Amino acid sequence: MTEIAIRQPASLDGSVRFAQLLADADLLPKQFVGKPANVLYAIEYGRTLGITPVAAITGIHVIEGKPSASSGLIGALVRQAGHKLRVKSDGATTATAQIVRADDPDFTYECTWTLERAEQAGLLQIKEGKPWARDRNGRPATWEKYTASMLKARAITEVARDACEDVLFGLHYTPEELGAVVNQDGEPVEAEVQQLRRVQPGEGDPWTTAPEPQAPRAANGRSQEAQDFATTAADASDKAALQKVYREANAAGLLEETVKSPDRELLELGAFLIQRGNELAEATPDPAAADDGYRTGLTADEVIDGEVVTTPEDDYAAAVADLRDAAEAARLDLDTFEVDAAKALGMALAEAPVDAIRSLAATLRAA
């Protein structure tokens, strides 16, 4: 039988032409069809890894500027380097991956992923003993439909990062670990793979510079409208102006839209307005609060109403109660609640300011 090999041209012009020809093939993954720059990047990265162009194209994905690979490709690289990789799974609730390095055969690296660990990481919930995970439309997500495959993928990539950093060449994560929506094989089905382009004079290298976060834009322009509210709030210099922005955004139903803050952090518009209210409160502290050394944070109701009607003690008690509710919703151990909260806050819970407690509660709810 005649052996057919795909060889990549040695010259840059030849490589570009080669990528252009491959990009015309409709059998490639959709992120490469008609995108020769993506093809060229994958091929060049594959050359570094010592894999064929086709293996690179089908296995490497760029998610938010970071190259990623399926757990299958990461496992293949480990074995290609001469190390032993073993994967065990019960097909439902647990998966274990082991690596024995060729240069250290007496030590076994091991990593185990279980349903409980996946739940702790916020990847799914366990309801009546079964995995439960839904997408933004309320439909069963990959972690619910293909739990066993996802557990194995996590176990493989984690043990590979621990044992074989020298063979990964930057391919530390799978697309799913970087936030992409994937199918049963770990291939991204929604995340946009960035397209390469020529760097113009005076520009930085887009592959060595972290991309600037961008607030997602909806087709109906709601995200842009929310961003306009955020910009107005960022420029507000008094509480009355901020109250007006909050009322208008609330009336428009935009408080849950994602916006970009002046420091380029992505967060919900409502959370940003409250954060901005806290900044204004700190800039003009209440003399009565300053007398006893206590500074209160603003809540959503206070942003709207423009006045604080509770005492510092009431605010503190409400914040702690909210944090406890968030911890319970996140299925954390309430027996060690105060100890865990102190570690997260960097101080005893009784000494923490209200805004810090509320911020921790918001973080737990988001997770």
Image (spheres, rainbow, N blue to C red):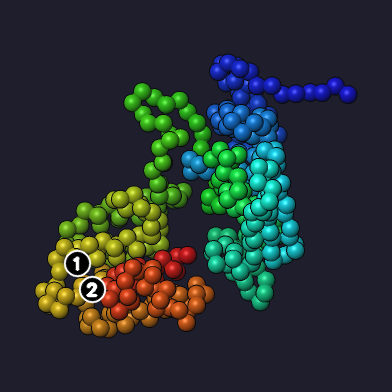
Q: Amino acid at mark 1?
A: Ala
Q: Are marks 2 and 1 in contact (CB under 8 Å)?
A: yes
Position of 128 with respect to 239 (left or right) is right
Sequence-first tag of 2 and 1: 1
Residue 332 visible (yes or no): yes
* Percent position of residue 363, x then y: 41, 66
For badge 2, the amino acid type reads: Thr
Residue under the point 35% across and 79% down: 320
Spatial CA distance of label 2 from label 1 is 8 Å
Q: Position of residue 329 (x, y in %)?
A: 49, 75
Regarding mark 2 in the picture, which secondary structure is present there?
A: loop
Left or right: where 24 falls relative to 347: right
The residue to which callout 2 is attached is: 296
Q: For this rendering, which residue is in front, 261 or 296?
A: 296
Q: Residue visible at 38% across and 60% down? A: 268
Q: Within 10 angstroms of label 2, few (less than 14), some, or many (20 or more) residues?
A: many
Q: Which mark is residue 27?
A: none
Give residue 6's quadrant in the image.
Answer: top right
Along the line of sight, the residue nearer the viewer: 257 or 168: 168
Question: Is 364 drawn above or below residue 79 in the view shown?
Answer: below
Residue topped by disc 1: 281
Residue shown at 53% from the left, 52% from the top: 179
Q: How many marks?
A: 2
Within-10-Å neighbours for mark 1: few <14, some 14–19, many 20+? some
**x%, y% of residue 51?**
66, 32
Q: Is 195 situated left or right of 130 in this image?
A: left
Whether residue 244 is situated above or below residue 170 in the rendered picture:
below
Q: Quadrant of residue 239?
A: bottom left
The secondary element bearing badge 1 is classed as helix
Q: Quadrant of residue 278?
A: bottom left
